[in-house]
Image (cartoon, rainbow, N blue to C red):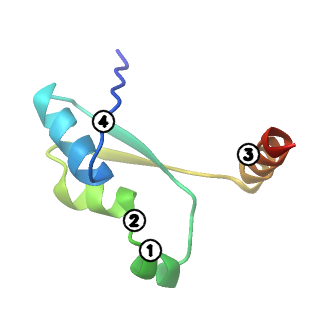
Amino acid sequence: HIRTRLATGDPAEQICAYAAEIDARLIAVGTRGYGTVASLLLGSVSNAVIRHASCPVLIVHETESTRERSDTAAADAES
C-alpha cells in the first residue's frame, strides 16, 4: 500500500514523522546523486532520513537518462 502526503517544513523531519505516524515498514526516497562536497554544502534529505528514520530506508538513485528526461521536461515547461 502506497501513501502520500503534502506537508510543509523540514523535508526529512516531515518524512520521518509521517513514517512513524503510520507505522511505515519502509521509506523510499530519491536522490539526485550530487557528490559528497555538494551534499555537505547543500545538505541531503535522503541522508537525514537515513539517520533519523525508525524503519528501513530505500534510496533510489536518479540515472543519467532520467536526469536528461527531467531536464528536457523542465525546459519544455518554461517554453
Tell me which residue sits at (20%, 34%) in the image: 18
Looking at the rendered structure, the kind of residue marked 1 is Leu
Judging by the rendered image, the residue that carries numbered circle 4 is: 7
Circle nearer the N terminus (1, 3):
1
Q: CA distance from mark 3 to mark 4?
A: 23 Å
Quadrant of the rendered structure where residue 4 is?
top left
Looking at the rendered structure, the kind of residue marked 2 is Ser
Q: Is residue 22 left or right of residue 33?
A: left
Looking at the rendered structure, the kind of residue marked 4 is Ala
For the residue carrying disc 1, how many other residues have a C-alpha within 10 Å: few (<14), some (14-19), or many (20+)? few
Q: CA distance from mark 4 to mark 2?
A: 18 Å
Q: CA distance from mark 1 to mark 2?
A: 7 Å
Mark 2 lies on a secondary structure that is loop
Circle nearer the N terminus (3, 2):
2
Quadrant of the rendered structure where residue 73 is?
top right
Observer-side mark, 3 or 4, equals 4
For the residue carrying disc 3, how many other residues have a C-alpha within 10 Å: few (<14), some (14-19), or many (20+)? few
Q: Residue 47: give x, y in percent of width and height.
A: 34, 63
Looking at the rendered structure, the kind of residue marked 3 is Ser
Does residue 54 lie above or below 10 as drawn? above
Q: Is residue 70 left or right of residue 13?
A: right
Q: CA distance from mark 1 to mark 3?
A: 20 Å
Observer-side mark, 1 or 4, equals 4
